[in-house]
Image (spheres, rainbow, N blue to C red):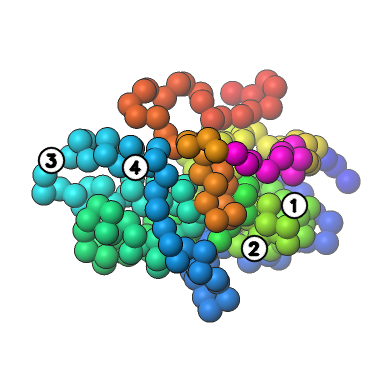
Amino acid sequence: MTDRITQTTALEGHGHGTLPVWKRTPEPDAGVDASVHARLEFSDAAKERLAWLRTRYPDGYQRALVLPVLSMAQREFGWVSPQVIAFVADAIPVPRMWVEEVATFYTMYNKRPIGRHHLQVCTNVCCAVVGGEQLLEYVCRKLGVHPGETTADGRFTVIGAECLGACGYAPMMQVNDDYHENLRSRAQVDALLERLAAEPDRVGTDPHLALGPGTGPGRMLPRNGPALKAGGNVHTPEGGH
């Protein structure tokens, strides 16, 4: 069997389209335990960033803070539960419904716990024609899950994603905040998954590290103001781009 992932490649045990493709993590249900969010408080770093964010908008325009503060809360607490929605609304402050409607509209907000590594495999047109759907199937088979599921050890959540804006470097997937592009062979995918699985759990007292309640990827809060470096957070195989 060829190592190359292409649109016409039939993966062992899975033909084209045999797995359901979830475009987002599922909504919370009765099986989700949100008790970990019973008592919420931003870290000192998050409080500092919230104070800085307030300076970016005139008085009376607090609604503009909903997206950045909700994103910051997800980094801090791991996922967006009803308790997190209420916490963000009180922290801004704005009506709770304003936060609820944003959290349920955008797919970037996870309404249930996710794994430490959130794998979002693009299956939109440009990726699909060069093996994006087969890439999703292969990742799921390697990890023993279906799209939308999390591995038993809590390390990986895999979903199919709509266009992630890397059409010229397809197929690709986003891992937490990083893009991994030109994933055209099983060897590349295997090496990536092995490296991620081997990463030690992040522990410590770094105020910029979002430990949360033990769910979701540990991520550093964005710095205030500095321009993004060209090409930052993008990983391509040697010879890519």
Q: Which of 170 and 157 is in front in this view?
A: 157
* Picture quadrant where residue 46 is located: top left
* Residue beneath disc 2: 149
Q: Which stretch appears magenta?
A: 195-204
* Magenta residue check for 218: no
Q: Is residue 237 left or right of residue 100?
A: right
Amino acid at dot 1 = Tyr
Query: Depth-wise, is mark 4 or mark 2 nearer the camera?
Result: 4
**Residue 230 placed where, x, y %?**
46, 21
Q: Which of 36 and 154 is in front in this view?
A: 36
Above or below for 179 versus 60: above
Q: In this view, does 146 lie to the left or right of 82?
A: right
The numbered disc on residue 138 is 1
Circle 4: is it few (<14), some (14-19), or many (20+) Cα within 10 Å?
few
Query: Depth-wise, is mark 4 or mark 3 nearer the camera?
Result: 4
**Residue 191 placed where, x, y %?**
77, 37
The numbered disc on residue 47 is 4
Q: Which residue is drawn at 51% across and 69% down?
A: 35
Amino acid at dot 4 = Lys
Secondary element under disc 3, as helix, strand or loop, is loop
Alpha carbon of mark 2 to alpha carbon of mark 3: how far?
41 Å
